[in-house]
Amino acid sequence: MLNMPLMQNNIEKDDIDCLITFLRNAEIFTQSRNVREFEEQWSKWLGVKHSVFLNSGSSANFITMAILKELYGGGEVIVPPIAWASDIASVLSAGLTPVFVDVNLKTLAIDESKIIKAITPKTKAVFLTHVLGFNGLTQNLLDELERRRIPLIEDVCESHGAVFKKRKLGTFGRASNFSFYYAHHMTTIEGGMLCTDDDEFYQYARLFRSHGMTRESTDDEFKKKIARENPDVWEEFTFLVPGYNMRSTELNAVMGMNQLKKLDANNKKRSENFKLFLNNLDSGKYFTDFELEGSVNYAFVVILREKNKDLLGKVVNKLREEKVEFRRGTAGGGNLARQPFVRKALPEINPSIFENAEHIHSYGMYIGNYPGMEKDKILKLCSVLNELH
């Protein structure tokens, strides 16, 4: 029996020790010096000017879309049907309209040619999700969006450290979002990061994170301007935008800084594991034609090459028998256009028109991939899957 959980605990003794040291000496536990230091370290590692630490990657999604609406007004946002629920929920919550575009099976990200065809005068942004560690960018897409002056928003919640043309994902868009959830490439237990090179976007991210208060801004001229325009409210309690409380804590930041030290080394192990898995998986039964350049996959993706319900049933039963934990539909449970909240908000959408998303939804799943996974288990897993007919 393989006994492969979906994830392995990547919180190690040194992570716990650093928290104990912090607890013994801390004077403040809510957002303070360590949060700022983690933001600076993350910005340096990623290669961006600004980072804003939040309580989740989903919060980063919601704040990003709120800022998009605040700065650029209403309209449409092109989104993928293979993503996470908050990618779509954040667009709806901001009063923007999601426009679904099918994905490319080789990257699981929105198909470049279909994005370009879907752009209209109403398009305010493209919200591209780098799914399960794959890169979803092409140079042609970046050039076309720049030519049309359409902002790119990158969801990198599942792809920390993946690169395109030797640059880390999350450095190409107007803003990018990361998650430090317990099961991702690195963790703060719960947490997320919003990153940007845009100074105005950064200031608004700080406001939206903390109730919309202008005192959260680091731009003194901006704060003075708002104070002059609003003389009837106190400067220390000026709520410029309808913000949230999406702050994180010093404890989460301390763990984040310690986890960041190990991220690159762990990513290398994940990439080696995934290549070993694909190289030994039967490419006649399973889709293995993924574009791996620059990818950092924290999951083994299993998608049947053909529509075969009988084989699917055997795969599911065998994995359960071997106690191999898995999730159906890959990221976010498959085709998000089928989810109840989407169908309620957008009843006119027919989910079946997204053929690749539908195939992933019905015939796809993922299995955990973590740095401590034994190579012999990977090979045994492939053997188990390959034997099924």
Image (tube, rainbow, N blue to C red):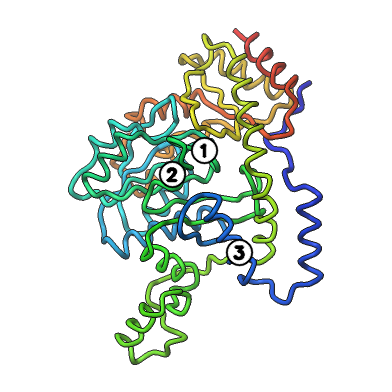
As drawn, which residue projects farthest toward the left?
121
Q: Which residue is mark 2?
A: 340
Q: Which quarter of the rendering shows the C terminus? A: top right
Depicted 253 relative to depicted 149: above or below: below
Q: Which kind of residue does numbered mark 2 sit on? A: Pro
How much space separates mark 1 and mark 2, taking CA atoms?
32 Å
Q: Secondary structure at mark 2?
A: helix
Q: Nearer the viewer, residue 146 or 57?
A: 146
Q: Earlier in the sequence, mark 1 or mark 2?
A: 1
Q: Earlier in the sequence, mark 1 or mark 3?
A: 3
Please tell me the numbered disc located at residue 266: none
Q: Secondary structure at mark 1?
A: loop
Q: Secondary structure at mark 3?
A: helix
* Structural crowding at the residue carrying mark 3, measured as other residues with C-alpha within 10 Å and reported as few (<14), some (14–19) or many (≥20): some
Q: Position of residue 186 (x, y in %)?
A: 64, 46
* Structural crowding at the residue carrying mark 2, measured as other residues with C-alpha within 10 Å and reported as few (<14), some (14–19) or many (≥20): few
Q: Which kind of residue does numbered mark 3 sit on? A: Glu
Q: Nearer the viewer, residue 164 or 101?
A: 164
